[in-house]
Amino acid sequence: MEDRAVVIGAGIAGLAAARVLSRRFSSVTVLDRDTLPDQAEPRRGVPQGAHPHILLISGLNELNELFPGFEAELIAAGGSKFDTGLGLATFRYGRRSRRIPTGLSLVSVSRPLIETIVRKRVARLPGVAIRDEIAVSGLAGSKGVVTGVVLDTGETISADLVVDGTGRGARSDRWLAALGFPAPDQAEVKIGVAYSTRVYRRRPGDMIDWQAAFTVPEPPAQKIAGMALPVEGNRWLVSIGGWHVAEPPDDPEQLDRYAKALPDTLVGDVMSRAEPLSEVAVARFPSSRRRLFEKLDRLPAGYVAVGDAICSFNPIYGQGMTCAVQQAGALGRVLDRHERRSDASMARDFYAAAATVISTPWQFAVGGDFNYPETTGPRPRGVRLRNWYARQISYAAQIDIGTSRIFNAVQQLLIPPGVLFRPVFVVRTLLLARKRRREDTAAR
């Protein structure tokens, strides 16, 4: 029976995979090339770590399963919990959301805090070791089997299963080619996303009636979104940016100008009331990218990729961490079905399961991205009709509590999107959307 696993990468995907593997292997080693900080702070290997992240409710539930008490630990560390309909003010299609209880609650914290808490929990697991400042240069193996990893120092660490969680910049194409295996095809959608973030001190009264704000642009004319999220340490993370942005704001004055140009005032109000605590940090995300491992004819035994090494989404939709932990859960279930054997058939079944995890959020993200004519890449079939219908659902959700709850649950990846296409739901949605448009007409 396989006994030893190695995980490359100590980000969310790698750490969640390590937790899953710790229940099935007696020894799990996690390797990362970064110096891993003791405190919750951004690190070089996570280039978007200084920017807002959303852990969807389904991802939070998965982490609670892997690490009992995880949500309570986030809140004890300063996280803000709020109902998505009561605490998050979403401005879209010319209207700010009504305060409608959904019964679905997010916990808002920084990405570094999530990673730090998960890493400390993983480090305490029996049989698990986390080693930082360790760079992997390739895979060891022969005859179709990966048997470990080769470090930059020349050292080889043997393993019965290697999990690659090295993210968007994964070098697995080259590593697999060195063992005689083909690289997966890629689907890449160029979106030109760029955004700028600044940290502010958070005090009572900075945001009246709400706990967080998200201003969504109305495509194709509008491209800029704004977000203010409460995080630990009584701070705001305020981020402004969007699609096909050539020059994101990189200084406070520019950031203020972008905020004042948003169609809703909430984000700008926070910036005007709160004390800045940082300079402006800029991130660029040129494209969403999906690597189609599930379509490969030949796969090595003893190796799988997870997280952004398979698929990296437009970060504006906040799906990446959740998909990573869901893939880790899928890996555990597939290993159990294969009686913990890490052969090529296990890898094939895992990639099929990972593709199922990715399918819905990929359709959401890529479909939304193609609202902009500048977006290029493989266009999903029927995307125009889907985007039109998504707009009708948004209209209906703004005035109807039932639609809002269902739409929120789908967006949080808690229920499958098929519910949105049931005939009764479709008819009701279209009637409510027409009512909402009439209200706008009457208000003009």
Image (cartoon, helix red, strand yellow):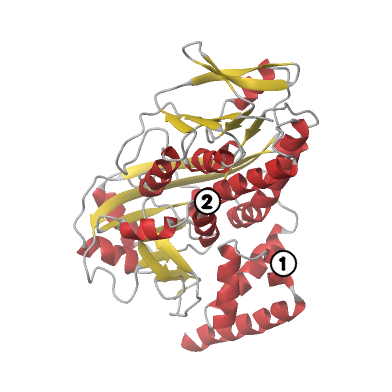
Q: Is residue 106 visible?
A: yes
Residue 367 picture location, percent across and down: 64, 56
Q: Nearer the viewer, residue 347 or 383?
A: 347
Q: Residue furthest top?
A: 154
| Quarter of the figure with residue 164 | top right
Tell me how far mark 2 sits from mark 1, CA to CA: 27 Å
> Who's the residue at 36% across and 51% down the image?
110
| Quarter of the figure with residue 279 | top left
Q: Is residue 372 visible?
A: no
Residue 45 picture location, percent across and down: 42, 33
Q: Nearer the viewer, residue 18 or 9?
A: 18
Determine whether 154 is above or below 444 in the image: above
The image shows a total of numbered marks equal to: 2
Q: Nearer the viewer, residue 11 or 340?
A: 340
- Left or right of residue 359, residue 19 in this image: left
Determine whether 301 is above or below 217 in the image: above
Question: From the viewer's perspective, is the residue at label 2 or at label 1 nearer?
Answer: 2
Q: Which of marks 1 and 2 precedes in the sequence?
A: 2
Residue 56 picture location, percent across and down: 51, 59
Determine whether 314 is above or below 137 in the image: below
Which secondary structure lies at badge 2? helix
Residue 370 picture location, percent across and down: 62, 54
Q: Looking at the figure, which quarter contains the N terminus? A: top right
Residue corresponding to mark 2: 66
Residue corresponding to mark 1: 418
Q: Amino acid at mark 2?
A: Leu
- Left or right of residue 80, residue 177 in this image: right
> Who's the residue at 27% across and 64% down the image?
270
Which secondary structure lies at badge 1? helix
Q: Amino acid at mark 1?
A: Gly
Give neighbour class at mark 1: few <14, some 14-19, many 20+ (Cα, 10 Å). Answer: few
